[in-house]
Image (cartoon, coloured by chain):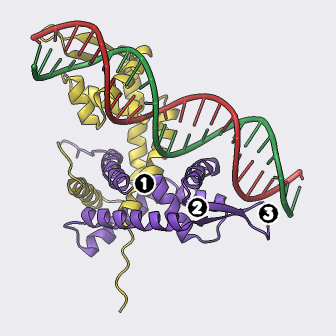
Chain colours: A yellow, B purple, C green, D red
Amino acid sequence: MTPPFHPPIGLSLNRTARLVGRAFDDELGRAGGSLPVWLTLLTVKMRKSASQRELAAAIGIQGATLTHHLNGLEQAGLLVRRRDPANRRTHQVELTPAGEEKFLRLRDAAIAFDKRLRDGFDEQEIEMLDRALARLRGNVGEEE
Amino acid sequence: MTPPFHPPIGLSLNRTARLVGRAFDDELGRAGGSLPVWLTLLTVKMRKSASQRELAAAIGIQGATLTHHLNGLEQAGLLVRRRDPANRRTHQVELTPAGEEKFLRLRDAAIAFDKRLRDGFDEQEIEMLDRALARLRGNVGEEE
DNA sequence: TATTGTTATACTCTATAACTATA
DNA sequence: TATAGTTATAGAGTATAACAATA
């Protein structure tokens, strides 16, 4: 008996993520953004008064890398960094009106993309997929 | 009634792929490789007499990008490029003995990693995950 | 001294455009 | 002219190390 063939699930995951990521990046590009820009704006919106370290960790990048993106976004007039009066080491990141507008535009693009991505899946299947992905993250040692 | 919340599946996919990809890259790094190097060697091995265009398409990168990686691998003495006598425009890519050795080492690392990735999944669950990923690829318009 | 963030620098992967060689 | 591949160049995203500011 020949043993069952196990195509590496990591290969499939990698291929899928690159293909989907590229399509998503194109979509965001048409809305005037990019994936890290979207993740940055989204995370800033969601985690209101977090330190940049926390934001970086939430996005999954290094602090210096976040600084790099924040610089670009600040130069583009999408956000401002203010020192926290309570602890002047930390910065408070806040979206400007232009930043809020960009956020909404990218959010619409993200929602439209996700709708396309879910096409043909029912709610239960998406939940199962989501749980499976979470288990994969657990298997490589996700820290939260 | 509040509508059900739909966390974007793309976000989950992206997060998982980056986390898993980083862990895999580390693993390959310890074996003296990297993800594109592994994909290149693997694809060269699998698609014996394919043109570089075909190899690039199979990996999911541009021809010039593949050239870039092949240059590195050739300089490292892992492969050679020979012109095909039948059609001297195309090149035949072949692993050297050192390349074969590297391939085996990276393959072992890849197999070990995939084993770790599958931990706690049974065969049926992996198959379902794989099919779900394939459907996601289909939803963004995969071309084969 | 420890913590937060920035600057300087560099690396990897990727891409596009122009080019060479073959057909 | 058309095809296969390379070279030149550039850009995006990421990282590490050294530094400045604050506590």
* Residue at 31% over, 45% down: B15
Q: Going from the N terminus, do you reach mark 2 or mark 3 first? A: 2
Whether residue B20 is visible: yes
Q: Is residue A139 left or right of residue B140?
A: left
Give whichever of B90, A42 is nearer the camera. Answer: B90
Q: Amino acid at mark 1?
A: Gly
Q: Quadrant of residue A89?
A: top left
Q: Is residue D1 left or right of residue B8?
A: right
Q: Quadrant of residue A70?
A: top left
Q: How many marks?
A: 3
The residue that appears at 65% across and 59% down in the rendered structure is B52
- Between discs 3 and 1, the one toward the N terminus: 1
Q: Are marks 2 and 1 on the same chain?
A: yes
Which of marks 1 and 2 precedes in the sequence? 1
Q: What residue sits right under mark 3 in the picture? A: B88
Circle 2 sits in a helix, a strand or a loop, which is it?
A: strand
User: Observer-nearest residue: B113 or A30?
Assistant: B113
Tag 1, which chain? B
- x and y, in percent, of residue A74 in the image: 39, 16
Mark 3: few, some, or many residues within 10 Å (few <14, many ≥20)? few
> On the rendered structure, is D17 left or right of C8?
left
Quadrant where the C terminus of chain A lies? Answer: top left
Q: Which residue is mark 1?
A: B33
Q: What's the residue at 65%, 58% (across, down)?
A: B53
Asked if A81 appears above or below A37 in the picture, the reply is above
